[in-house]
Image (cartoon, rainbow, N blue to C red):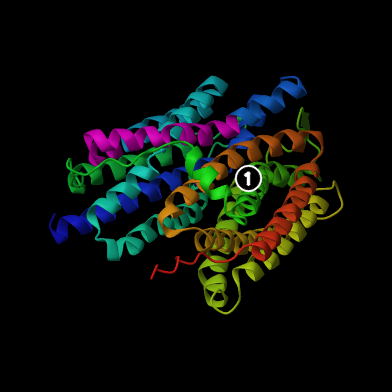
Amino acid sequence: MSDLARRSGLVVVFATVCVDLLGFGLVMPLLPLYGKALLADRPADQAGWTLALLMTSFSAMQFLFAPLWGRVSDRVGRRPVLLASLAASTAFYALFGVAALQRSLAGMFAARIGAGIASATIPTAQAYIADITPREKRARGMALIGAAFGLGFTLGPLIGALAVEIDGVWTDRGGLSPWPGYLAAILSAVALTLALFRLPESYDPTRVPETRKHIDWQSLRQALAVPSIGPLLGASFLAVFSLASFEGTISLAIDAKLAEPAMSASSAFGTVEAEMPPARLFFVFAYIGVIQCLVQGVLVRRIAGRVSDAWLATVGGAIAVGGFALLALSVQPAVLGTAFLMLASAVLVTGIAFVFPAVQSLLSRRSDPAEQGGILGAQESVGSIARIAGVAFGVRTFRQAPALPYWSAAAMMAVALLLAVLAARIGRDWESPAPEC
């Protein structure tokens, strides 16, 4: 492959991943409120479970289909899989807009399930980069995936705010604007057009296909044989679970907080305000994304080489526990305002931004380099399960008491903090065995 084709491929793969995250950021902030509006006439318990299923359907499909897309790309090539992904994303985000316009719960489920299946191609994008970059430049290529994640998650909510402003008849539709879905579909269609003309095939049919599994149990057993790996995986699970609980409920928390002065309507989820400005939710998610990017990209990068990973995990875990406690206090009715809720969110995100890089670094340093792929893959699988379960737990417990998911997450982060400290004390960095004389 020529240098020009290689650069073109990297640009298109970056755009593909970025568009996936843009679509996620466009839809995710409003999804809890859309579901709540469509379930307002259901019994409280049924409404809670249904909303939890709607919120987790996207991540569940990604978890199930990511290995499948990877295996398909090993047989037919990367380009057809990425093109199919973008085409399907275009269709299902458009369906989301139609479902919002028609106030169809079944259509909303179909759109989220389909978008989750279509977007489960991150491993394929990673394989594409691995195909076209030499080993010594592989890390720089893979960094594009992380950059696309950060950019998409930050810009998505901002574009979502623009989308709902485009819709000048918000209140006439009962709050269910179709424009976030439509705009996500337009962005996917643009990326699809770019890929059709500018994405060369990278697949080498002589290459041995990589084994792709949901959870590699053999690698997991080998990882757990290392004394500190088990506690680190446990800390990772609890941290992801807690963060997912926050991400799944922050829209509901803001909605309830803004509704306090009006007390205009009620449903199974508590008092809501019918004319709550939706753009605020998108700005909140963008605000969270910017804080995470600044803390990880600037603060953590500057101090990581000067302090130990154990110190980063300990300080970050303590900050996150405090952030969840502040969130629990901020959602109490008529106690503290929205500004305090935003401050609590910033504290939480700052702590989490410290924890994740530290835990990943410790996992990498404590494992045999020959087994790092399996161990980091096990962490990714554990994180996927935690993300699905965390959203479901958060939505369910928020209905029971708005502060409950945050107090629970504070307790879980405290346990994660203890596990990280334990792992730092009982383990040591991997050392290659001395050669035999």
Q: Residue furthest right?
A: 335
Up the image or down, 57 lies above or below 222; here it is: above
Up the image or down, 311 lies above or below 61; here it is: below
The residue under label 1 is: 244
**Residue 120 location in percent, x, y?**
41, 38
Front residue of 329/107: it is 329
**Residue 121 location in percent, x, y?**
37, 40
Seen in the image, is 191 located left or right of residue 244? left
**Residue 180 location in percent, x, y?**
48, 40
The part of the chain drawn in magenta is: 54-83
Front residue of 238/152: it is 238
Residue at 68% in and 39% down: 275
Residue at 44% in and 69% down: 434
- Residue 63 inside the magenta-drawn segment: yes
Residue at 27% in and 37% down: 74
**Residue 154 location in percent, x, y?**
50, 56
- Residue 236 inside the magenta-drawn segment: no
What secondary structure is the magenta-colored segment mainly?
helix
